[in-house]
Image (cartoon, grey):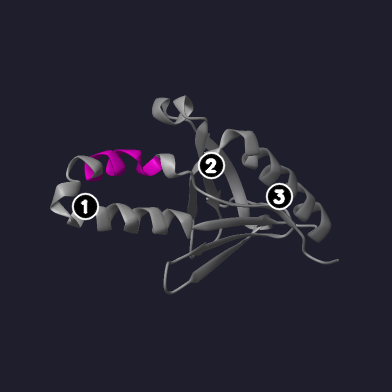
Amino acid sequence: MAEETIWRGTSSQIKNLGCFILCGLFCWLIVPIFIALSRYLQTKNHVFELTSERLKITEGVFNKVTETLELYRVKDIEVLQPFFSRMFGVENIKVNTSDLSSPVVLLEAIPKTVALADKMRNQVEAVRMQKNVREIDLE
């Protein structure tokens, strides 16, 4: 079965609002303009892609790095909604995994309208059923 993309997107630029305001106030120094541009490009080029089998996170402006997380390794999905984020309709999604290289994955400033946490949970369950994988915690 071919892997299909369920959702692909980036974080909202709202997470850089404080930096943008500060850089706007001090734009007469010229350097803050480059700082704001850098933050904008970093956020714009931090791409999340949820497929039917994996979560892919690509980041980097000039050098791209792609990290993949097999969905059957997801242990828990936590939705964090700080007050400031709720005002702008975004949420942070914290994914706890059994992957050794990335035990915690944080997806920041994802629009609520996407309902990414629910989509991810449904895909995790589907992949576990398809691959017949069970999560066992040993202490």
Residue marked by disc 2: 110
Q: Nearer the viewer, mark 2 or mark 3?
A: 2
Image location (x, y in percent) of residue 114? 64, 39
Quadrant of res 3 = bottom right
Q: Main secondary structure of the magenta part?
A: helix
Q: Earlier in the sequence, mark 2 or mark 3?
A: 2
Q: Nearer the viewer, mark 1 or mark 2?
A: 1
Residue marked by disc 3: 124
In the rendered view, tell whether residue 100 sits above or below residue 15. Answer: below
| Mark 2 vs mark 3, CA separation in Å | 19 Å
Judging depth in this view, the residue of 3 and 69 nearest the camera is: 3
Q: Are marks 2 and 3 in contact (CB under 8 Å)?
A: no
Q: Amino acid at mark 3?
A: Val
Position of 26 with respect to 79 (left or right) is: left
Q: Amino acid at mark 2?
A: Ile
Q: Amino acid at mark 1?
A: Pro
Residue marked by disc 1: 32
Judging depth in this view, the residue of 120 and 30 nearest the camera is: 30
Q: Earlier in the sequence, mark 1 or mark 3?
A: 1
Judging depth in this view, the residue of 53 and 101 nearest the camera is: 53
The structure residue drawn at horizontal position 55% and vertical position 53%, both measured from the top left corner, is: 97
Query: What segment is highlighted magenta in the picture?
Result: 15-23
User: What secondary structure is found at the residue carrying circle 1?
Assistant: helix
